[in-house]
Image (cartoon, rainbow, N blue to C red):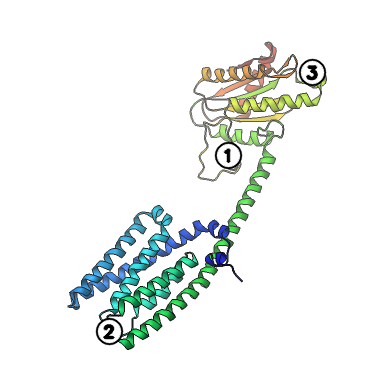
């Protein structure tokens, strides 16, 4: 047996139903747009015919009022999408009420005829929209009672009994049909949500795999292959401006390893990676960096950094305007490196060689200039930067 709570959510628990709420609102909105436009078009045409051919002023005024109300709902759904999606349930019940009221009004002038519009709308409209089962059931019941109450003074006793029977029959049909059709829709929404979750998990796993294969595990900067590939692409397509390719080499790294072990060396690399990331404001979009689409424009204002191997790092600084600004960044970088203590009385030191360029150029040529500059920095006493 399905509990009352699960019955309200078409056999699902509240959590599952709420997880599908965004899909339900979107579905209701799209259905409301189409159905309100069609209903408005039909009533507009009927109103025009009523004005031209029917002499009953009250019927004409009635049609105009219902048509105007539907027109407002139609206008809201087409002009205020976000509002309509958020308040789709309220708009649905408003539209439902207008149409059912029209169905009631349409049968009043015919005391010896059965109502046609009301019972058809009573079955059709609940089938189109997803709401909570108990809410929709209560609404159908209330509208059926109102229908019976209103027509009792306008129908003959024979037709009134028939209308009561029809109202009961069509209400029950509407409730059961609504429940089973919406139950199938909710199942499709749940399946869609599950598929979306699987896709998200797959994309996340792909991203993690790309990250694992592109990031150096110690420094958490780009590894050699990824950095060189990205740097070549940027330098080859560089627009006019100012940028620099820098090679950073830790000073006395071998002595640090020999004296304090590889753990100390690993800690030095990890710490240097953090300093570089912070000082150069490194932010990575790996999917776009590794697999740019044809429409992706290269962002030349983003700095890159990678570990080439051992104690050697490479920086591509494109966020500066001139040499003065570049050397200010490198000076601050060395200052932070020198302020880092790995062991007691052991501080990090590094030499940096850089080569600047102002337009797209050959990567190997810039690399060679930066490498020569690095040796100049080493020859001139280490723990400094050198370049032109």
The residue pinned by badge 1 equals: 285
Question: Which label lies toward us, 2 or 3?
Answer: 2
- Whether the residues at callouts 2 and 3 have beta carbons within 8 Å, the answer is no
Badge 3: residue crowd in 10 Å (few <14, some 14–19, many ≥20): few
Foreground of the two, 237 or 58: 58
Q: Answer yes or no: is residue 129 visible.
A: no
- Whether the residues at callouts 3 and 1 have beta carbons within 8 Å, the answer is no
Q: Secondary structure at mark 3?
A: helix
The residue pinned by badge 2 equals: 111
Q: Position of residue 20 (x, y in %)?
A: 53, 58
- Whether the residues at callouts 2 and 1 have beta carbons within 8 Å, the answer is no
Identify the residue at horizontal 80%, vertical 26% (top origin).
262
Q: Decide if residue 111 is on the left or right side of residue 80.
A: left
- Give the image quarter of residue 356: top right
Badge 2: residue crowd in 10 Å (few <14, some 14–19, many ≥20): some
Q: Quadrant of the N terminus?
A: bottom right
Image: 276 above or below 290? above
Question: Which label lies toward us, 2 or 1?
Answer: 2
The residue pinned by badge 3 equals: 255
Q: Position of residue 291 (x, y in %)?
A: 59, 44
Image: 209 above or below 4? above
């Amino acid at each position: 047996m399905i509990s009352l709570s699960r019955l309200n959510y078409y056999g699902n628990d509240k959590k599952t139903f709420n997880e599908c709420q965004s899909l339900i609102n979107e579905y209701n909105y799209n259905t409301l747009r189409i159905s309100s436009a069609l209903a408005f078009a039909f009533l507009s045409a009927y109103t025009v015919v009523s004005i031209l051919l029917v002499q009953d002023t009250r019927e004409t005024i009635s049609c105009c009022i219902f048509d105007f109300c539907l027109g407002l709902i139609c206008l809201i759904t087409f002009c205020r999408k976000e509002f309509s999606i958020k308040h789709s349930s309220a708009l649905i019940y408003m539209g439902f009420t207008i149409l059912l009221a029209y169905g009631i009004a349409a049968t009043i002038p015919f005391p010896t005829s059965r109502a046609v519009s009301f019972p058809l709308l009573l079955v059709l409209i609940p089938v189109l929209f997803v709401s909570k089962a108990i809410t929709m059931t209560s609404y159908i019941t209330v509208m059926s009672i109102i229908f019976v109450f209103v027509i009792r003074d306008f129908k003959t006793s024979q037709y009134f009994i028939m209308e009561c029977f029809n109202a009961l029959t069509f209400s029950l049909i509407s409730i059961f049909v609504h429940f089973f059709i919406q139950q199938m829709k909710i199942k499709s929404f749940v399946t869609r949500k599950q598929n979306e979750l699987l896709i998200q998990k797959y994309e996340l796993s792909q991203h993690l795999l790309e990250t694992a294969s592109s990031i150096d595990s110690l420094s958490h900067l780009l590894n050699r292959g990824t950095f060189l590939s990205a740097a070549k692409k940027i330098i080859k397509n560089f627009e006019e401006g100012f940028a620099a390719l820098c090679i950073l080499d830790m000073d006395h790294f071998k002595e640090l390893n020999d004296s304090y072990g590889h753990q100390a060396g690993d800690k030095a690399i990890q710490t240097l990676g953090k300093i570089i990331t912070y000082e150069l404001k490194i932010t990575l979009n790996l999917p776009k960096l590794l697999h740019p689409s044809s429409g992706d424009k290269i962002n030349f204002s983003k700095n890159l950094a990678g570990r080439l191997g051992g104690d050697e790092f490479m920086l591509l600084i494109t966020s500066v305007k001139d040499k003065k600004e570049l050397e200010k960044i490198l000076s601050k970088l060395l200052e932070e490196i020198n302020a880092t203590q790995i062991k007691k009385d052991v501080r990090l030191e590094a030499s940096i060689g850089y080569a600047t360029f102002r337009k797209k150029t050959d990567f190997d040529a810039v690399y060679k200039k930066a490498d020569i500059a690095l040796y100049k920095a080493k020859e001139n006493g280490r723990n400094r930067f050198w370049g032109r």
